Amino acid sequence: MTAPPEFSPQFMDQLRDLLRWRRDVRHFRPDPVPEPVLDDLLRTACLAPSVGLSEPWRFVRVDDAARRTAVRADFARCNEAALADRDGPDALRYARLKLAGLDDAPHHVAVFSHPDPAQGRGLGRTTMPQTTTWSTVMAIHTFWLAATAAGVGVGWVSIIDPDRVAAVLDMDPALELVAYLCVGYPAAPANTPELERRGWERRAPERRQWIRR
């Protein structure tokens, strides 16, 4: 049996730096990420934990120009509706935000989750079936951290209609769209959230404290 590695204090400092620099990127350089790098990110993402070893995630490269255009159009519709729900200064602040890198990112990746995969044989899902979705989110986060370590940026586009986008991508309707990601080299890496830099929101220090019961 292989002995577990020992992680030094210096590694822990680097891990915290990785988490600080893992930002939601909306501004990308146009040059593509090499295919071997993208393939390695996918392999690393698949090291994520999953309920019952079900590995419910499905990573989909969206390379077709017509499909990308349709996703952009859906984002525009949803973003316009979200703006219409706001008024006053809040609407003005919202309108100034860049909320997606769909036009800039050289790569689009849709991540789907199988809600009831045969793999894993249902272990751990009887009382909490949503754990398949959570497992897919873990894979997305693992992909994101690996990308950051490789100097690659990721942006999560959530202002879309998941059913419409799934139809655009001609995916099995049994699969659940969890994330639509923009992937590429960031135009200007940053270690603070863009929404914080733009004055939309701030981190809450109290979230760093345990809730005790």
Image (spheres, rainbow, N blue to C red):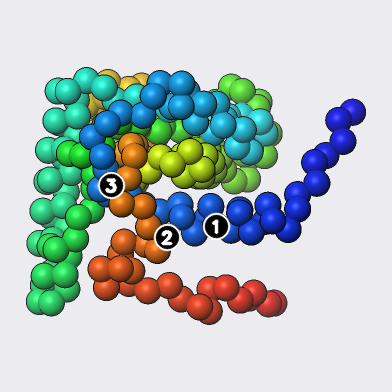
167 vs 96, nearest the viewer: 96
Q: Check whether the beta carbons of the residues at disc 1 and disc 2 lie within 8 A of each other.
A: yes
For the residues labelled 3 and 1, the Cα–Cα distance comes to 19 Å
Quadrant of residue 14 within the rendered picture = bottom right
Q: Is residue 155 left or right of residue 165?
A: right
The correct choice, above or below, for 131 with respect to 66 in the image is below
Circle 3: is it few (<14), some (14-19), or many (20+) Cα within 10 Å?
Answer: some
Residue 73 on image: x %, y % = 12, 38
The 10 Å Cα crowd at callout 2, few under 14, some 14 to 19, many 20 or more, is few
Give the spatial CA distance, label 1 vs label 2.
8 Å
Q: Quadrant of residue 123?
A: top right
Residue position for label 1: 17
* Mark 2 lies on residue: 191
Q: Position of residue 130 (x, y in %)?
A: 52, 44
Residue 87 falls in which quadrant of the image? bottom left
Front residue of this view, candidates 8 and 183: 8
